Image (cartoon, coloured by chain):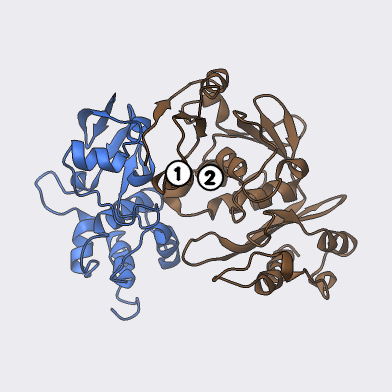
Chain colours: A brown, B blue
Amino acid sequence: MYNFDVEKPTSIADAVKALSRDEAQPLSGGQTLIPTLKARLAMPSVLVSLSGISEMRGVRLADDGRLCIGGGTVHRTVAQEAETHYPGLASLAARIGDPAVRNRGTIGGSVANNDPSACYPAGVLASGATIVTNSREIEADNFFQGMFSTALEEGEIVTEVKFPIPEKARYEKFIQPASRFPLVAAFVAKFNDGVRVAVTGASENGVFRWTEAETALSADFSAKALEGLKLDGGSMISDLHGSGTYRAHLVGVMTKRAVLGLI
Amino acid sequence: MTQVKMTVNGKAASGDVEGRTLLASFLRENLGLTGTHIGCDTSQCGACLVHVNGEAIKACTMLAVEAEGADVKTIESMANADGSLNVLQQAFQDHHGLQCGFCTPGMIMSASALLKDNPKPTEAEVRHYLDGNICRCTGYHNIVKAIMAASGQDVSALAAE
């Protein structure tokens, strides 16, 4: 690792101020960023640690019925505290990485990084969640903008994610056995006015909504409704772990499994 | 350089570190606690697993300055007060839960975190919990067996050694 200074603000306001320094970068749980720094793929001069900001931690049910999760909340806490209100999301959090990763990694860090194979973006997008930052609120549909790319501006911090709670939801992932990331995973959320399906791990453009499946499932919430739906393997990630065609096929399988688990 | 202070294995510890100093390096190089192993350096193998404020953490993926004020426990704190092996360590010996031994500190720390939350895990729960601990001798079966035995469960029915 190249060396850097570390700042440890205790409020969002102080963190924003610290991030205005030259070559400053936020550090949340560090479960992606620290390995990235070790590989010398990033060289910030200042890391602004967000883990001391208590106003960014916690899971609460808001008056409007949405489940609000602080950006600095670790996966383990979400797995435990979201269970009563939104079990589909708690189950996603309980299966990210491994126990030690879940004790450090945060929801804010995961959505801000937008790794094309990360779990949370699928849950956030399929839920139609709202990403709250220090300066504004961004709908999930506008937030994720391609591989490792989001609507966040320089120095902007994800302070909270607000989830509408569906009637039922399920996350199914096919794990890439070496990295433990999803090779492909699908999150299916059934609301009373329709179904949303988000897919991670598959596309060259990162997390995406599978709109054909949404339309079919909104009309008929059954595995049968998915029959005959096909995605184009040409726009899927193709690497030594699986071809684009294989990934496109897996999207269908994971979505079907999620639906079968919900009926 | 920044001065960090924390409690390590019940004793006050401090030292001057750079921003980039990892908790694993601080434990090994500043404090001489070399039981915390660095196996992969890519956050995958779990040999560096320690407890920070009671939670399992990969010490190679946490900055030392972030452990300021924390209560850290390493493999060196696991033996009984008289120096004999604790229940978990003894079970690893009894059930051949180690071969080369490199992953063992991480396995013991991970298993003790599991048993604290879940005192009687099923075999499937043990295997799921050890997702982040890699044994390159592939001795998983006896590691699982040792952890099940340490939790006071009968392991005679577990498949072949």
**Which residue sits at x=33%, y=44%?**
B59
- Work out whether A179 lies above or below B51: below
Measure the C-alpha gap from mark 2 to mark 1. Answer: 7 Å
The N terminus of chain A - image quarter: top left
**Which residue sits at x=74%, y=29%?**
A63
- Image quarter of residue B40: bottom left
Considering only order in the chain, which callout, 1 or 2, is on the residue closer to the N terminus?
2
Side (left or right) of A58 relative to A207: left
For badge 2, the amino acid type reads: His
Whether pointer 2 and pointer 1 mark residues with C-beta atoms closer than 8 Å, the reply is yes
Q: Secondary structure at mark 1?
A: helix
**Residue B154 visible within the image:** no
Side (left or right) of B107 relative to A101: left
Image coords of residue B75 (percent x, y):
23, 48
Mark 2, Cα crowd under 10 Å, few <14 / some 14-19 / many 20+, is many
Mark 1, Cα crowd under 10 Å, few <14 / some 14-19 / many 20+, is many
- Work out whether A201 lies above or below A47: below
Image coords of residue B151 (percent x, y):
31, 59
Q: Nearer the viewer, residue B152 or A204?
A: A204
Give the number of callouts.
Answer: 2
Provide the residue designation for mark 2.
A75
- Work out whether B28 lies above or below A190: above
Provide the residue designation for mark 1.
A103
Q: Chain of mark 2?
A: A
Q: Chain of mark 1?
A: A
Image coords of residue B158 (percent x, y):
34, 76
Q: Secondary structure at mark 2?
A: helix
**Which residue sits at x=31%, y=39%?**
B23
For badge 1, the amino acid type reads: Asn
